[in-house]
Amino acid sequence: MSTVSLYQEVILDHNRKPRNYGTVENASHQAEGHNPLCGDHLSITLNLSNQCIDSIAFQGESCAICKASASMMTVSVIGKMYGDVETLVKEFRDMVMGNLNINDSHHLGRLTIFSGIRDLPTRVKCAILPWHTLHAALNSITNISTETKNDSIHTMISKIG
Ligand code: ZN
C-alpha cells in the first residue's frame, strides 16, 4: 500500500472508530484546545499515576486530521511515563513541522503516517492541536489555543501560516 493510501485509510479508520473517545472520570489533568483557523476544539482528560498515564480520553468537534491525530495520540501515550510522553510530543511536533528526519532514531512508530502533513501548512495546526493540548494538560495549563501566546509550543507553531 502506498504511503498516501495508508495515510487516508488510517485517517478514515480513526474517524469511524475514534479510540479513547469521551472523558476520564476523576481525571488528574485536563485541558481544552482550540484551533480557530480550522474550528477544531477538543478536550483531553487523563489520569497520571506515579508519573505514568493510566488513562486518557479526548472529545470535541474537529476535522478528520485533528480527530485521527487525537485518537492515535491516546493509543500512543497510554501506559507511558510523563518524560517519554513529553519526548513524543516534541518529536511529533518536529515531524509535522519538517524538523525531524524520520529516518533518524525516534519513538513515533505508526505516527509517522502524519509526516506528509509538513507539506500541507494549513493542516499542521490540526495535527498538532491534540499534542499541544496534551502538553498543556500535563503542565497544568487548562486552556490553550493555537492562536494565543500562552505556552512554549505556541512560539514554535506561530511561525506557520
Ligand atoms: Zn482541523
Image (cartoon, rainbow, N blue to C red):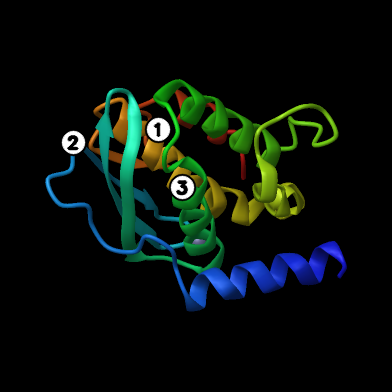
Q: Of the residues tagged 3 and 1, which is closer to the observer?
A: 1
Ligand 1 near label 1 (Cβ, under 8 Å)?
Answer: no
User: Along the line of sight, which residue is nearer the eye, 124 or 6?
Assistant: 6
The Cα–Cα distance between marks 3 and 1, rounded to whole angstroms, is 10 Å
Q: Label 1 is placed on what type of residue? A: His
Q: Residue furthest bottom?
A: 16
User: Along the line of sight, which residue is nearer the eye, 24 or 127?
Assistant: 24
User: Along the line of sight, which residue is nearer the eye, 15 or 53?
Assistant: 53
Quadrant in the picture for the C terminus: top right
Q: Label 3 is placed on what type of residue? A: Leu
Residue at the (42%, 27%) spot, across then down: 81
The residue to which callout 1 is attached is 135
Label annotation for residue 129: 3
- Tell me which corner region of the image, top left, top right, bottom left or bottom right, holds residue 143: top left
Residue at the (53%, 69%) spot, across then down: 14
Determine crowd level at label 3: few under 14, some 14-19, many 20+ residues with C-alpha closer than 10 A: many
Whether 122 is drawn above or below 31: the answer is below
The residue to which callout 2 is attached is 28
The Cα–Cα distance between marks 2 and 1, rounded to whole angstroms, is 14 Å
Q: Label 2 is placed on what type of residue? A: Ser
Whether 141 is drawn above or below 6: the answer is above
Ligand 1 near label 3 (Cβ, under 8 Å)?
Answer: yes
Whether 84 is drawn above or below 41: the answer is above
User: Along the line of sight, which residue is nearer the eye, 131 or 122?
Assistant: 131
Query: Which is nearer the N-term, disc 2 or disc 1?
Result: 2
